[in-house]
Image: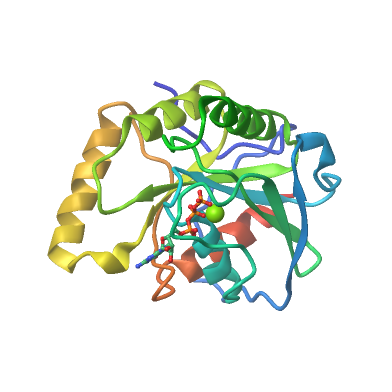
Amino acid sequence: MHTPSTNRKRNSKTITTFASNKMKMRIKEAKFVKSSQKVNECPKPTMPEYAFIGRSNVGKSSLINMLCKRKKLAKISGTPGKTQLVNHFLIDDKWYLVDLPGYGYAKVSKTKRAIFSKLNETYILTRENLMCLFVLIDSRIPLQNSDLEFITTLGEKKVPFCIVFTKTDKLKKSTYDEQITDLKNQLLEHWEELPPLFHTSSVSGKGREEILNFIDDVNSQW
Ligand SMILES: Nc1nc2c(ncn2[C@@H]2O[C@H](COP(=O)(O)OP(=O)(O)OP(=O)(O)O)[C@@H](O)[C@H]2O)c(=O)[nH]1
Ligand SMILES: [Mg+2]
């Protein structure tokens, strides 16, 4: 099966490196730009951007806040389905972080669910400055069908993505290791190679540096 290589900016370049041993990337300023109901309402695609997607409640908005070290930049809620629009955050006037609506949340009406996924689909398939999609997976539970379906579609459409395991603070180290091995094996049943993986906690800040360094590397290919 096709490897989910991180190749985007539609026109060409391939992300070949996975950041390590480098200066820490710093975020000085993060500001909310707008919430868009349609992709053509999003900010002009003049800068690189990175979007966060995953099942409702997986921790997308929390991760954006953690990366920016801001508690209330993206809205967080214990109730799944909080983020329903495409939310753009401008970082240091140079690149965007994007909070996308969750998928696979059963409690929103079917019509709404369809709209969410259409919005996500259009965004993912047409947003020309989307450098990489971060797909968030809850590290505490086995891989869900909705995750697998979603990731498979990304592969088919050749959308570059990374996988982010969230809420790692909620598991003991030994349980976590087992759980991650299981998740990786589940993915390897469908993929020959895994995309870049990140392990995060929005509570402890784990994974922040790794994700920011990755973004810094990809930004340099813009
Ligand atoms: N312990 C812990 N809780 C987390 C973490 N990330 C998110 N949460 C909690 O999980 C819940 C959902 O977080 P959100 O960031 O709103 O999740 P979301 O994916 O943006 O959800 P929707 O916008 O509804 O799709 C909140 O109660 C967060 O406080 C984490 O790393 N550790
Ligand atoms: Mg959210």
Q: Is 176 placed left or right of 132 in the picture?
A: left
Q: How many marks?
A: 0
Residue closer to the observer: 10 or 68: 68
- Residue 149 image offset from top left, x and y in percent: 41, 26
Q: Is residue 215 above or below residue 112?
A: below
Residue closer to the observer: 152 or 192: 152
Kindly identify the residue that appears in the image at 18 percent across and 67 percent down.
173
Give residue 105's quadrant in the image.
top left
- Residue 102 image offset from top left, x and y in percent: 51, 43
Ligand 2 shows up in the quarter that is bottom right
Residue closer to the observer: 195 or 42: 42
Query: Is residue 220 visible from the viewing direction of this image?
Result: no
Q: Is residue 212 above or below residue 49?
A: below
Kindly identify the residue that appears in the image at 33 percent across and 29 percent down.
145
- Assign the N terminus to one quadrant of the image: top left
Q: Is 41 placed left or right of 150 in the picture?
A: right
Give residue 158's quadrant in the image.
top right
Kindly identify the residue that appears in the image at 75 percent across and 36 percent down.
128
Q: Is residue 24 above or below residue 144?
A: below
Kindly identify the residue that appears in the image at 58 percent across and 25 percent down.
111
Query: Is residue 186 visible from the viewing direction of this image?
Result: yes
- Residue 58 image offset from top left, x and y in percent: 42, 52
Residue closer to the observer: 183 or 104: 104
Q: Is 46 placed left or right of 124 in the picture?
A: right
- Residue 136 image offset from top left, x and y in percent: 44, 48
- Chosen colour scheme: rainbow
